[in-house]
């Protein structure tokens, strides 16, 4: 028996690979900062999507050579590049603010250590090498006041969330402050249910949380109707209460935050949306100016006249200056019922003339307009590749993973050798040409043995038997014995699913007639049997339908499958079937499965010529309806002569 590799040894290797990966990522980050320094001097844009496209295309190609999936490589590098771009932007912005640079920054945020606002602020400062002195606040208003009064340098305020939408309270506060928005930052908000060690979900009776997480996790909470909710001023307060409580209480918060309070994760991914992110704005007393190499966002508030089209007119100005609006929000104005204050985020830098021009023009047609801030946009839209670049090119790499269609079980790339089905003296596929006849069992009369003998003498190796539901067990078993005694194989056509067991017990091979080709259940039942199966094409089915049916049968385990073309409906003679010889050529070129041609439903006059043509085109078998055995004997002799010629 093969010895299993030692788990701890393999894990040690993985740990060491991960360590190297991190070292390399840190090195890449460092290099990207050097690029930023060079761009600072050359005054070139930070973002270079042309370079990113080339890089990604190359990486996807190289990844393929290592057997790595294109989408995996793409998404991995999209986040590496996002980090690199954000880092470069942060570097350039802090260079621009250099004059006001301090050693320690007082940061006001909601809650205490471990709250989402704390995590956002912490990340923001870390990226900018700013040392953070944290000032947890009890409300958004308190944050604003802390910055206004000079107690804090920056205030962090959540402005919108992908699950719960805009945070109105913050928008309303922005109407009444002179602070400026100087930055934005987005964090992943992975809501977890946090409780003291050794708690279990079944025993939780109360959940403590801030109203925002409660609304973002409404679906989860509705699924646990017995849990009582207790609203808190922040996620940090919720976690603190739980850390002082018993094992029947839990808080909603991040796993990272929970760690500050020694809480464990009882359940995770609680948010209604899979991607649950919160965007925060950073406010300060002094506005910043954004270097023109960085994509900037400008936030403004305005009120327009109460006449029809006044908002549209204001927005039209932005359109005329080619400025994109990324967010438009309206909030009631305190003290003036039914009048709205509009909040707009636009992609643009107030250092650019066309932006200033647009704002100037808007002043003329609005009642009030004020820029709340112009700041570096953290919306790094991932660079994408063309679909064709993500597809596998078969010749590009020998290690490439098979493409969906190529991995289909019927295809030559799935199986190199031709499938050959052998049953008694009947050989189908891989160069062997089978001669098969078809008859209806009800036409047999009593002379079974004579009939079987005549078929054998005509040169057939197998008989497709139709109409079994109309005969009893004895008739069928007798006829099959006669056939087998003479070395003929009995192929039974399963015209209805109910006949399957009966058919199976009397057959050497089974045939799925065209009418049953779409019967998925029958396909899977035959796919689970260890008996050769012939799959006839439905006369309305496309090649792809037919091959899909073949694939679903093969996927159930049975690999002894033969395809059978029996004619399709054509436009020239809709009342008669036309043999699709093109399908024979095409399918034989892409599939390893044998394919036989059934002429039973084709105009009798055409049968001899079509049989010869089919042989010529490398059909693996020909089915002729029981008929004039003398003529058929001649035809088969002619075909075999043709077949034996090199
Ligand atoms: C590092 C650069 O800056 C940006 C970041 C990139 C990266 O991380 O690979 C690529 C292109 C730019 O958008 C660069 O221009 O090379």
Image (cartoon, grey):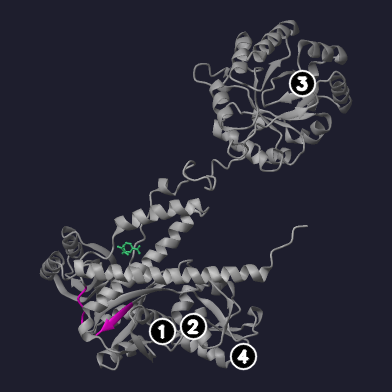
Residue 176 in the figure: left or right of residue 230: left
Residue 484 in the figure: left or right of residue 116: right
The answer to the question of whether label 1 and label 2 lie on touching residues, with beta carbons closer than 8 A, is yes
- Numbered disc 3: secondary structure: strand
- Numbered disc 4: secondary structure: loop
User: Label 1 crowding class (10 Å Cα cut-off): few <14, some 14-19, many 20+?
Assistant: many
Mark 1 CB lies closer than 8 A to ligand 1: no
Q: Nearer the viewer, residue 530 or 336?
A: 530
Q: Quadrant of residue 597?
A: top right
Q: Which residue is mark 3?
A: 462
The answer to the question of whether label 3 and label 4 lie on touching residues, with beta carbons closer than 8 A, is no
Query: What is the C-alpha distance between the residues marked 1 and 3?
Result: 79 Å
Q: Which residue is mark 1?
A: 118
Mark 4 CB lies closer than 8 A to ligand 1: no
Which region is colored magenta? 281-290
The answer to the question of whether label 2 and label 3 lie on touching residues, with beta carbons closer than 8 A, is no
Q: Nearer the viewer, residue 501 or 16?
A: 16
> Magenta segment: does it hold 283?
yes
Q: Which residue is mark 2?
A: 257
**Of callouts 1 and 4, the N-terminal one:** 1
| Residue 242 place in picture, x, y as percent | 55, 88
Q: Nearer the viewer, residue 548 or 645?
A: 645
Q: Residue at x 40, y 53 (%)?
A: 58
| Residue 448 place in picture, x, y as percent | 86, 15
**Of callouts 1 and 2, the N-terminal one:** 1
Q: Which residue is mark 4?
A: 246
Q: Quadrant of residue 543?
A: top right
**Of callouts 4 and 2, the N-terminal one:** 4
């Amino acid at each position: 028996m093969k010895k299993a590799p030692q788990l701890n040894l393999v894990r040690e290797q993985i740990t060491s690979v991960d360590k190297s990966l991190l070292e390399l990522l840190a090195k890449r980050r460092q290099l990207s900062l050097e690029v930023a320094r060079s761009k600072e001097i050359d005054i070139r844009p930070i973002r270079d999507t042309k370079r990113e496209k080339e890089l990604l295309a190359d990486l996807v190609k190289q990844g393929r050579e290592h057997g790595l999936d294109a989408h995996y490589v793409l998404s991995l590098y999209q986040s590496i590049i996002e980090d690199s771009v954000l880092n470069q932007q942060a570097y350039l912005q802090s260079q621009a603010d250099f004059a006001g640079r301090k050693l320690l920054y007082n940061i006001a945020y909601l809650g205490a250590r471990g709250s989402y606002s704390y995590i956002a602020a912490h990340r923001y400062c870390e990226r900018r090498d700013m040392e953070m002195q944290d000032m947890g606040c009890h409300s958004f208003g308190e944050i604003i006041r802390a910055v206004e009064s000079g107690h804090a340098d920056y205030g962090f305020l959540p402005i919108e969330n992908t699950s719960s939408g805009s945070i109105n309270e913050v928008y309303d506060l922005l109407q009444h402050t002179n602070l400026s928005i100087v930055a934005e930052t987005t964090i992943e908000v992975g809501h977890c249910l946090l409780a003291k060690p050794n708690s279990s979900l079944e025993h939780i009776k109360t959940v403590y949380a801030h109203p925002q997480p409660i609304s973002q996790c409404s679906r989860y909470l509705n699924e646990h109707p017995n849990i009582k909710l207790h609203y808190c001023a922040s996620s940090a307060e919720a976690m603190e209460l739980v850390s002082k409580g018993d094992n029947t209480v839990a808080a909603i918060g991040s796993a990272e935050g929970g760690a500050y309070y020694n809480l464990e994760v009882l359940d995770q991914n609680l948010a209604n949306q899979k991607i649950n992110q919160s965007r925060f704005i950073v406010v300060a007393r002094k506005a910043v100016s954004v270097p023109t190499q960085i994509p900037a966002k400008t936030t403004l508030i305005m009120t327009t006249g109460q006449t029809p089209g006044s908002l549209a007119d204001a927005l039209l100005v932005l359109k005329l200056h080619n400025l994109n609006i990324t967010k438009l929000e309206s909030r009631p104005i305190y003290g003036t019922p039914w009048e709205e204050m509009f909040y707009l985020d636009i992609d643009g830098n107030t250092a650019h003339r066309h932006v200033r021009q647009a704002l100037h023009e808007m002043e003329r047609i609005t009642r009030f307009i004020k820029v709340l801030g112009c700041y570096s946009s953290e919306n790094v839209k991932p660079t994408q590749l063309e679909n064709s670049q993500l597809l596998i090119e078969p010749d590009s790499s020998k290690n490439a993973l098979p493409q969906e269609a190529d991995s289909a079980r019927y295809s030559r790339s799935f199986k190199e050798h031709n499938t050959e089905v052998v049953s008694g003296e009947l050989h189908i596929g891989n160069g062997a040409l089978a001669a098969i006849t078809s008859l209806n069992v009800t036409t047999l009369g009593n002379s079974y043995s004579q009939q079987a003998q005549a078929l054998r003498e005509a040169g057939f190796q197998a008989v497709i038997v139709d109409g079994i539901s109309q005969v009893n067990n004895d008739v069928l078993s007798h006829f099959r014995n006669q056939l087998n005694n003479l070395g003929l194989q009995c192929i039974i056509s399963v015209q209805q699913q109910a006949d399957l067991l009966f058919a199976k017990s009397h057959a050497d091979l089974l045939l799925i007639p065209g009418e049953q080709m779409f019967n998925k259940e029958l396909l899977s039942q035959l796919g689970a049997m260890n008996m050769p199966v012939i799959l006839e094409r439905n006369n309305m089915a496309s090649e792809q339908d037919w091959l899909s049916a073949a694939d679903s049968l093969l996927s159930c385990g049975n690999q002894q499958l033969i395809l059978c073309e029996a004619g399709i409906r054509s436009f020239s003679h809709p009342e008669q079937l036309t043999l699709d010889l093109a399908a024979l050529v095409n399918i034989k070129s892409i599939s390893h499965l044998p394919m036989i041609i059934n002429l039973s439903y084709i105009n009798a006059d055409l049968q001899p010529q079509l049989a010869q043509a089919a042989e010529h085109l490398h059909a693996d078998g020909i089915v002729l309806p029981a008929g004039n055995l003398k003529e058929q004997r001649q035809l088969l002799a002619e075909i075999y002569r043709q077949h034996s010629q090199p």
